[in-house]
């Protein structure tokens, strides 16, 4: 089974914020580049299918600047056979439709059985590139795949989709097709040191995004989606619960030891069941939980007598 997996290099910040308040842009330091976790799970799915069928190849493709070859070598150390790097600058990676068109044009003439994407990228959370590629190539698409089953080569595949509230949907899909993979499909493997060394020596094929864009008749310099500015999230001050100044010293200590959780006020009723029922009825009526026309239980009892 020949699979093509599209992976993306994302930026994760380890500082308080990745936004420069002066320029409203991303800071140039304080971050690390890594593979998108959803794409890594998609690659794991493709590698498992190759191992299960015992034949086929796994090709990984990424679109980005020169530094993006790091995720390609990481993918090859995990088990990918070949890698293709579509060289592009970061400014052209904002419109998902343009990204999808470049990726679709790149693999249009390739021989494949399945195209794998992560369900979304953690940096922008668009989650639409895989669906766009399927539409551009005229292929069926199944999103949020949580389990992938293939019984016989050349037959339809059975996949499970992750729905809301933990529900699952099982669907049958013919090949070739596009699949976007959910994180619940499984934990990706970790490469060994010899595999990392081998991947560092592998050749990576490179393509020019501008050439592909011209071939696809794309105007990559005027995308429909433009990020005009970035802003820091609003700070949410923590609530500090202070004890009431009217409490005694022992009461303040009890308040602090309880974590600031005060006792809820309320009335207790007890004794005779009929009086208790009447008190509850009066409370519900006072709080307007019951309409005014309702009689108290004891009144209904007297009326029946």
Image (cartoon, grey):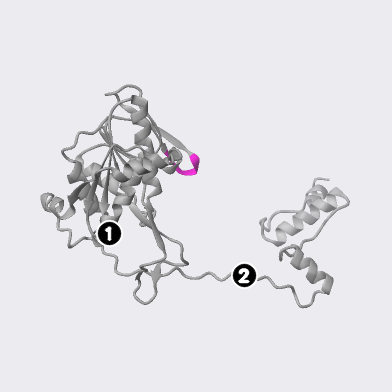
Magenta stretch containing residue 163, yes or no? yes
Q: Can residue 7 be seen?
A: no
Q: What x and y, as percent, mark residue 194?
A: 39, 40
Question: Quadrant where the C terminus lies?
Answer: top right
User: Based on the displayed image, in which of its 4 quarters is residue 10 positioned?
Assistant: bottom left
Give the residue furthest to the top: 152
Q: Position of residue 207 (x, y in %)?
A: 18, 49
Give the quarter of the figure containing the N terminus: top left
Q: Label 2 crowding class (10 Å Cα cut-off): few <14, some 14-19, many 20+?
A: few
Q: In the picture provided, is 176 more to the left or to the right than 143?
A: left
- Disc number for residue 145: none
Does 195 lie within the magenta span? no
Q: Residues within 10 Å of mark 1 (few under 14, many from 20)?
A: some
Picture coordinates of residue 120, whole percent (x, y): 36, 49
Report which residue position mark 2 lands on. Answer: 239
Residue at the disc numbered 1 = 94
Number of labelled discs? 2
**Image position of 266 (left or right of 36):** right
| Identity of the residue drawn at 23% across and 37% down | 139
Q: Judge by depth and name the residue closer to the eye, 101 or 11.
A: 11
Identify the secondary structure beneath mark 2: loop
Please tell me which residue lies in front, 143 or 48.
48
In the image, 235 versus 18, the foreground residue is: 18
Q: Hey, which quadrant is residue 175 in on the image?
A: top left
Query: Between disc 1 and disc 2, whose residue precedes?
Result: 1
Give the structural element (helix, strand or loop) at label 1. Answer: loop
Task: Name the chief secondary structure element in magenta.
Answer: helix
- Magenta range: 162-166
Residue 36 showing in the rendered view = yes
From the viewer's perspective, is residue 38 above or below residue 114?
below
């Amino acid at each position: 089974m020949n699979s093509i997996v599209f992976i993306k290099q994302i930026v994760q910040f380890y500082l308080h914020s990745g936004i420069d308040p002066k320029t409203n842009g991303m800071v140039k330091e304080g971050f690390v580049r890594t593979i998108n976790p959803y794409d890594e799970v998609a690659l794991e799915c493709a590698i498992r299918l190759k191992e299960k069928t015992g034949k086929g190849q796994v090709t990984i493709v990424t679109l980005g600047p020169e530094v993006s070859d790091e995720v390609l070598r990481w993918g090859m150390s995990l088990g990918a056979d070949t890698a293709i790097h579509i060289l592009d600058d970061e400014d052209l990676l904002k419109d998902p439709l343009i990204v999808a068109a470049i990726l679709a044009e790149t693999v249009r003439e390739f021989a494949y059985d399945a195209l794998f994407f992560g369900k979304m990228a953690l940096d922008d959370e668009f989650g639409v590139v895989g669906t766009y590629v399927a539409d551009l190539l005229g292929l069926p698409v199944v999103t949020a795949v949580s389990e992938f089953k293939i019984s016989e080569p050349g037959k339809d595949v059975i996949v499970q989709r992750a729905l809301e509230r933990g529900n699952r949907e099982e669907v049958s899909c013919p090949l070739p097709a596009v699949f976007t993979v959910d994180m619940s499909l499984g934990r990706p493997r970790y490469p060994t040191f010899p595999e990392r060394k081998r991947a560092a020596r592998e050749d990576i094929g490179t393509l020019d995004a501008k050439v592909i864009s011209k071939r696809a008749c794309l105007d990559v310099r005027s995308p429909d989606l433009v990020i005009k500015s970035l802003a820091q999230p609003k700070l949410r001050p923590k609530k500090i619960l202070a004890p009431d100044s009217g409490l005694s010293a022992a009461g303040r200590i009890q308040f602090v030891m309880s974590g600031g959780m005060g006792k809820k006020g309320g009335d207790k009723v007890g004794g005779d069941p009929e009086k208790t029922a009447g008190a509850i009825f009066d409370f519900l009526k006072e709080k307007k939980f019951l309409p005014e026309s309702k009689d108290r239980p004891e009144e209904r009892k007297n009326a029946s007598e």
